[in-house]
Amino acid sequence: MRGGVLQLDSPWGAKYVARAFPCDVCKVAKAGFTTMSDDKDRASLEELESKLAAVAGKREEKHGPNRATGKPSQGMALGMRISAEMIAAVLVGLLIGWALDRVLDTTPWLLVLFVFLGAGAGGLNAYRVAKGYDSAVGLGRAMREHKQGDGK
Amino acid sequence: MAGPLEQFEIKPLAELSLGGIDISFTNSALWMVFAAVLVTCFMTLSMRRGALVPGRWQGAAEVMYEFVANMLKDNVGSAGRKYFPFIFTLFMFVMFGNLLGMIPHSFTFTSHIAVNFALALVIFIGVTVIGFMRHGTHYLRMFFPEGAPIATAIILVPIEIISYFSRPFSLAIRLFANMTVGHIMLKVIGGFVGLIGILGVLPFALLTGITVLEFGIAALQAYVFTILTCIYLHDAIHMH
C-alpha cells in the first residue's frame, strides 16, 4: 500500500515537520531565527535544552503533564459550565434517590436525601469549576496539586 | 413561519424495526452519516498526496490533527497517546455535527440530548474502565477527599460519587443547551425580520452577528467536549 506516504507524523513535539522533510533544512530554518552566531554559546544552549527536556520528561512521568489550571475561563462560557454542573449533579442525585427508593421501597425518603446530596455535589462542582480545581476528582487532592503548581 | 422548536423534530426517513424496537433511519441519523462521511472524506482526500509542503486542504487537515494532538498531550501527557484516535474522532464528529447544523434547513444532531448522552456515556464508561484497569480498587480512593477527617466520609463519599456520576450528564447537557439555545435564538430573531416591515433591518443585523457567534460556539463546544474528555482521561490515568 501507500502506507509510507499516508502515514502521519508522530503528534508529539512542539514543531511539526512533515516526515519527509530533510532534517538539515529544519536546522537551517531554526538557525535562521536565533541571533546567536557563536558556536560555543549554541552548544551550551543545546546542552541546556536537552537537560530541560530530560527534567520535564521526568516530571511528567511522576506528576502527569504540567497543565495551566487555575485560570478560570471568562464570562458566558464559565456561567454555562457552572449551571450545567449544578443541574447535572442535582439530576444525578434525583435519579439515584428515585432508583434506590424503588428498590428499597422507602419512598420518598431517599429521594429527598439524595436531592440534597446532589445539590451539595452541584455546589462542590461549581466551586471546583470557578476555582479551577476541576482537574482532579477529590477536592483535597486538587487543592494540593494546585498549591504545588503555584508554589514554584 | 415554522415555530422555533420545529427544527428539532425527528422525522423517520425509513421505517425500520428490530424485534419490536424502533430503529428507523431518521433525519438525525442521516446527518450523523453526513458528518461521518464528510470527516472521512476531508481527512483522507486532503492527506491523499501527503505532500512535502502542504497545500490548502492538507494544511487544514494538519491543523486539526495537531490541535487535537497538542490538546491531548497537554492534558493527558504521553500516556494519552494511544487514545488519540478516539479523541480525534470524537472532536471531528462533534464539530462537524455542530457546523453542519449551521446550514439552513439542516438538522443539528448535537441538539438532542440522546445523542450527546450516548457519546458522554461511552466516554464515562471508557474512562472508568481505564481507571480501574490502571489502578484496580485503588481507583475507589478518589471518592474520599484526601486530608478530610474520616468521620466526614459518610457525607463526602456520596457527594463525591454523585459528582463523579454527574460527569456524563454535565457533558451532555452543556452541548445540548448551547446548541439548542443558539438555534432557537436564531429562529426567533429570524421571525422578527419579516414581521416588522422596514424595521426588520435591525433584527437582520443582529441575526448576522449572532450567526457568526453561533459558528464560534459550534467550534468552541466541540473543543470543550473534547477537552473535558481529556481531563477525565487524565484523572483516570494519573490519580496520584
Image (tube, rainbow, N blue to C red):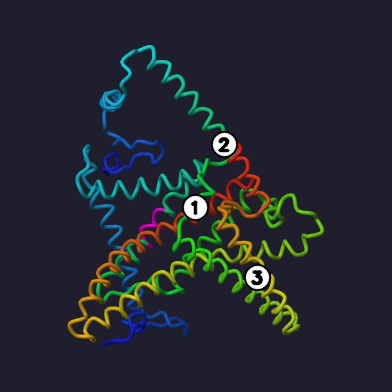
Q: Residue furthest front?
A: B199
The chain ID associated with circle 3 is A
Image quadrant holding the N terminus of chain A, namely top left
Q: Look at the numbered disc 1 and give the secondary structure of its residue.
A: helix
Answer with left or right where residue B86 lies relative to residue A116.
left
Q: Residue furthest right?
A: B151
Examine the structure image and report whether residue B91 is included in the region drawn in magenta. yes
Q: Residue at x 65, y 45 (%)?
A: A144
In this view of the protein, which residue sits in the foreground, B125 or B91? B91
In the picture of the structure, the residue carrying the numbered disc 1 is B230
The chain ID associated with circle 2 is A
Dot 2: few (<14), some (14–19), or many (≥20) neighbours within 10 Å?
Answer: some
Q: Residue at x 35, y 36 (%)?
A: A15
Image quadrant holding the C terminus of chain A, namely top right
Q: Position of residue A38 (x, y in %)?
A: 33, 13
Query: Amino acid under label 2?
Result: Glu
Please provide the residue range marked out in magenta: B88-94
Viewer-side label of 3, 2: 3
Residue B199, relative to residue B210: is it above or below? below
Examine the structure image and report whether residue A132 is included in the region drawn in magenta. no
Answer with left or right where residue B87 lies relative to residue B1.
right
Q: Look at the numbered disc 3 and give the secondary structure of its residue.
A: helix
Which of the labelled discs sits on residue A26, or is there none?
none
Which of the labelled discs sits on residue A61, or is there none?
2
Q: CA distance from mark 1 to mark 2?
A: 17 Å
